[in-house]
């Protein structure tokens, strides 16, 4: 093991302390705290940043079952090993059901306990996952198609089986819920006033379910509730979502509000949405320039041009000149778009053959992990092409 396992020892007062101490390994395990009773376990875990919990309890302890279940819920990544004084028989099953990794009877050799601890740690260590792509959808003004883009990208990723969540940070006038036909039973405002610390399970309770599999944190239903949703809340929320999902997509209000800036700072990608008129294009350029000033890597910015074919008289060259760069995706105007909004099913799913749907599919592909072609296969393909 790379370093000693930081271990929090929780003692049931009914268990002789010396029995516990002699069961604790001297090597590989660093007892960072030993606490009596089960009430402050979560606090102690946070304070000591312990890697795991060893609980010493009596075989008839009811409180320990609750404590294990609570620890499992709040800190699913921290293993729990139980040392039980007295024959644990019927107790064992309940201890495992509560989420413990292992249970042994006291007295116990330190060697055995060390083995159990190492096994528990190894089993819980999750394989390293790439951090979720966190895509913030920006647009210089209202009505450019930010919400349209957010929703279509979201449902496409979700319907392909990627765990995807949309957060509506247009806190005053957000309409992602409306666009997806979701009832605002629980919104980000409700989450903000719920109190207590945020964890994955709690956040999950506030995410609406769309039929595509997409989860959505809906914007407050009234503009006056917006101020409850602070930048601090968002900064607490994002890491939780990034842990639980493959993609986090954030819809935004126009402009660089503090929430938007904080969101850009934690994002991996920006999707800038503009429309095809000179004013919007100029503002799009200003938006792109602002990102550059913020030091945002240009390679991680996509430019979507919405209502792309409506205005004759603006050529592709004009667009590139006024907007400052060539758009990556062109979305045409489409009568089915407002219609699909009424149905709560974005055009990408309701009319998959339409040009608009194809544009959003192309946008989605930009965010899929590049498929690595094994070298030999790549070479074979090259040879086939030459022949
Ligand atoms: N390409 C398009 N074709 C038809 N209607 C569109 C198109 N893009 C957007 N709309 C409609 O315009 C309105 C504004 O779009 P929306 O995505 O809500 O903009 P934003 O979120 O940037 O304010 C919506 O009613 C949407 O359905
Ligand atoms: Mg919007």
Image (spheres, rainbow, N blue to C red):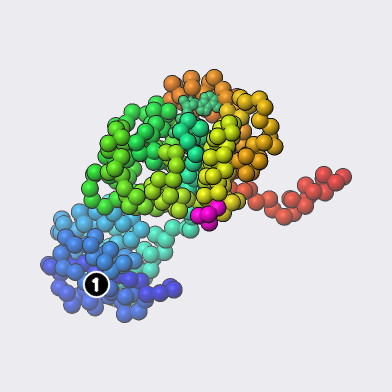
Is 191 in front, or is 274?
274
Residue ID for mark 1? 33
Which residue range is magenta in the image?
292-296
Q: Main secondary structure of the magenta part?
A: loop
Look at the image and tell me in which quarter the C terminus lies.
top right
Residue furthest to the right: 387
Tally the numbered discs. 1
Q: Is residue 384 left or right of residue 61?
A: right
* Observer-nearest of 174 and 319: 319
Quadrant for the N terminus in the image:
bottom left
Residue 102 to residue 223: above or below: below
Q: Residue at x 26, y 57 (%)?
A: 71
Q: Note whether 174 is above or below 8 in the view shown.
A: above
Please determine whether, in this image, residue 313 is positioned above or below residue 234: above
Q: Residue at x 32, y 52 (%)?
A: 232
> Where is ligand 2, by quadrant?
top left
- Is residue 126 rendered to the left or right of residue 78? right
In this view, which residue lies farthest toward the bottom? 26
């Amino acid at each position: 093991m790379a370093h000693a396992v930081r271990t929090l020892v929780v003692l049931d007062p009914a268990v002789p302390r010396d029995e516990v101490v002699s069961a604790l390994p001297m090597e590989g395990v660093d007892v960072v705290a030993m606490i009596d009773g089960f009430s402050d376990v979560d606090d102690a875990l946070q304070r000591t940043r312990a890697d795991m919990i060893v609980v010493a309890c009596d075989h008839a302890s009811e409180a320990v079952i609750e404590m294990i279940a609570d620890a499992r819920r709040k800190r699913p990544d921290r293993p729990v090993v139980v040392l039980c004084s007295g024959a644990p028989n019927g107790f064992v099953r309940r201890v495992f059901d509560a989420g413990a990794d292992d249970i042994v009877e006291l007295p116990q050799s330190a060697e055995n306990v060390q083995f159990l601890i190492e096994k528990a740690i190894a089993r819980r260590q999750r394989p390293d996952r790439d951090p979720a792509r966190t895509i913030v959808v920006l647009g210089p003004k209202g009505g450019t198609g930010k919400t349209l883009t957010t929703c279509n990208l979201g449902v496409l990723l979700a319907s392909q089986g990627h765990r995807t969540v949309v957060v509506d940070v247009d806190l005053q006038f957000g309409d992602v819920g409306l666009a997806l036909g979701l009832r605002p039973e629980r919104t980000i405002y409700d989450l903000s006033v719920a109190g207590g610390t945020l964890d994955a399970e709690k956040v999950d309770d506030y995410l609406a379910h769309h039929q595509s599999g997409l989860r959505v944190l809906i914007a407050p239903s009234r503009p006056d509730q917006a101020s409850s949703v602070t930048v601090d809340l968002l900064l607490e929320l994002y890491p939780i979502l990034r842990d639980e999902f493959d993609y986090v997509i954030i819809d935004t209000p126009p402009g660089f509000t503090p929430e938007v800036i904080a969101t850009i700072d934690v994002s991996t990608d920006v999707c800038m949405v503009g429309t095809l008129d000179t004013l919007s294009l100029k503002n799009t350029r200003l938006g792109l320039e602002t990102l550059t000033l913020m030091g945002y890597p240009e390679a991680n910015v996509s430019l979507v041009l919405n209502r792309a074919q409506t205005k004759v008289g603006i050529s592709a060259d004009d667009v590139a000149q006024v907007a400052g760069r060539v758009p990556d995706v062109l979305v045409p105007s489409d009568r089915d778009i407002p219609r699909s909004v009424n149905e709560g099913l974005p055009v990408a799913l309701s009319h998959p053959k339409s040009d608009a749907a194809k544009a959003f599919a192309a946008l989605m592909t930009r965010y899929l992990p590049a498929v690595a072609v094994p070298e030999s296969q790549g070479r074979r393909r090259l040879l086939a092409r030459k022949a």
